Amino acid sequence: MHYIWKEWKENIRGKGLWLALSIIVLISISILFRSTALSFDKGFYVLLINLFDTIIYFIPILCLFIGAFSIFQEKEQKTLIMLLTKKDNYTSFLLRKSLGLYTVVLVPILVWFFLYLLLLKFNFQLDIKAYFIFILAIVAMSLIFLQMGAAIGSFSTSRMQIIGYTIFVWFYFFFLHDFLLLSLLPDITYENVKVFSAGYFLNPLQSVRMFLETGMGVYSFGHMSRLLQAFMWTKPVFFLLGNLIFWFITSIAAAIIFHRKEGFE
């Protein structure tokens, strides 16, 4: 609880969280205005997909920056040394700090999307299950990139390093990962397609997108080829859970192994 309160006070004074929330609010409202011409019964699903396709470009990089600078600030202000000297080891500090980050970032986002649902009620026929799946997709994506950001802040020694690492991670998952997989397509067969599938869904953006679109019924896998059946060898929700577990473990391990105690070493 101490870490959550500390994180909340720091983010209230800072601009990063409010800038991130403002961007999400502005995007959500603009998508709503653009969707007013959609039909009352089907427009709800189109709006959610369009909204997700837009904010997916912003939430990852915003969470990376918030997570990274939150950890780096502890090193820069010498509070990390004080915490580790008194009672905490770095693993305990990182886990508590991560919990504080999750709470501070997700609570304002969830509050906004609750209010947003009330606005949608006046324009569309609501599907609460689909909206809940949409919220889960946003939460899962935020958690993954916040934890990656915490790892970046742990092993970065300057603000310029944070910016460089963050842009690289964002660029990799949006462009390089899929580009590398595309180069492997000629060699994909029925025998190795599951390995290819695991690599494809290792990208959190793809696993979150597949979870959202199948959960909302946008895509159906009722009449798949044998190759596609092998590619989708488990349900999208399990791909997403596996993605969460993998990146949580990887990010936490990288943060613990490579962390630097000072921001200017």
Image (cartoon, rainbow, N blue to C red):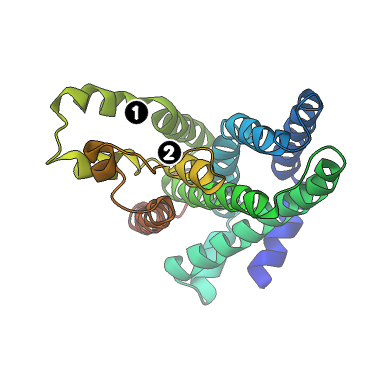
Q: CA distance from mark 1 to mark 2?
A: 9 Å
Residue drawn 58% across and 31% down?
53
SS assignment at label 2:
helix
Q: Amino acid at mark 1?
A: Asp
Q: Which mark is residue 134?
A: none
Task: Give above or below for 185 relative to 222.
Answer: above
Label 2 near label 1: C-beta < 8 Å?
yes
Quadrant (top left/top right/bottom left/bottom right) for the N terminus: bottom right
Question: Residue 148: x percent and y percent?
Answer: 46, 47
Identify the residue at image location x=59%, y=60%.
Answer: 79
Residue 54 screen position, x and y as percent = 62, 29
Badge 1 or badge 2: first in the primary sequence: 1
Residue lying at 53% horizontally and 75% vertically, measured from the top left:
86
| Viewer can see residue 108 | yes
The residue labelled by disc 1 is 178
In this view, 255 is above or below 152: below
Q: Is residue 194 left or right of residue 259?
A: left
